Amino acid sequence: MTKLIILLTVLILLAFIMLVFLIAAIIRKSKGPLIVSLVAFFALLGTGYYTLSYTVDKGTAVTVKLAKKIIDPFFPPFDSDQPDTEANQKNFRHFLQVAITADVKNIYCFDDAIGQDTDYMFSFNCDTATATAIIKKLDLSKDSLPGDNPESMQHDFDWWDKKRINELTGYSWQSNTQGKNLHKRFWYDTIDQKAYFFQYSL
């Protein structure tokens, strides 16, 4: 704000100098005041352009910050490169519908919600009790065979082990509402105490 006040003060001062010397040039019919007036005019243009750019940049930053503050509580971002962020925890509660207990750690998530088809990926560490609570809460049914993993639809991350998932028995749920298929898939690795959740629509 201080910088903007200084810039506006300079603009007013340059405009005043330009006006005074322009009037002096007209009255005296002299080139000296006219040159000073022209210099002040071009300085005014340059300072005005910089002030406009500065104001737009500041306004954009404030707008983005305000929009983020308003939108994030309702639509938090998905942090695929950093675990246990506040946004990831909010997304975990929203999608998995269970509380984050002391055993739940290393929550990574990713979303691809561009276009008609969407998919969401979560991986995290938890104990068997939490995994069981998720299966019950989401009303998931145990798959008959391991390896039933739609991995071609999934994205590649260090925290998403497709090879290991193919070795695990999964749990699933699906619905068909208004011609849109919604699928939920869940796998739990009892050895590493790591869970994988994949939700997608077609």
Image (cartoon, rainbow, N blue to C red):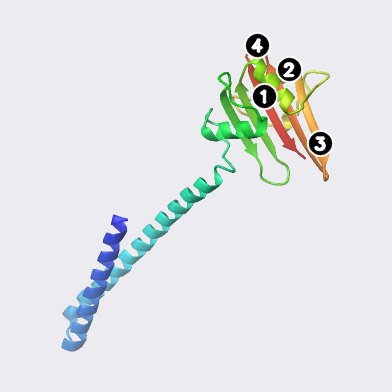
How far from the left and from the top, in percent, is residue 47? Answer: 30, 64
Within 10 Å of disc 4 (Cα), the crowding (few <14, some 14-19, many 20+) is: few
How far apart marks 1 and 3 lie (CA) works out to 20 Å
**On screen, residue 26 above or below 181:** below
How far apart marks 1 and 2 lie (CA) works out to 10 Å
How far apart marks 4 and 3 lie (CA) works out to 31 Å
Disc 4 or disc 3, which is closer to the eye?
3
How far from the left and from the top, in percent, is residue 45? Answer: 32, 69
**Secondary structure beneath label 1:** strand
Q: Count of labels shown?
A: 4
Query: Mark 2 belongs to which amino acid?
Result: Leu
**Secondary structure beneath label 4:** loop
Q: What residue sits right under mark 1 in the picture?
A: 196
Q: Nearer the viewer, residue 11 or 22?
A: 11
Disc 2 or disc 3, which is closer to the eye?
3
Query: Mark 1 belongs to which amino acid?
Result: Tyr
Who's the residue at 61% across and 27% down the image? 99
Which is more N-terminal, label 3 or label 1? 3
Q: Is residue 146 left or right of residue 154?
A: right
Query: Mark 3 belongs to which amino acid?
Result: Ser
Residue 186 seen in render: no
Q: What residue sits right under mark 2 in the picture?
A: 168
Within 10 Å of disc 3 (Cα), the crowding (few <14, some 14-19, many 20+) is: few
What's the mark number on residue 191?
4
Who's the residue at 20% across and 74% down the image? 36
Q: Are marks 1 and 2 in contact (CB under 8 Å)?
A: yes
Query: Mark 4 belongs to which amino acid?
Result: Ile
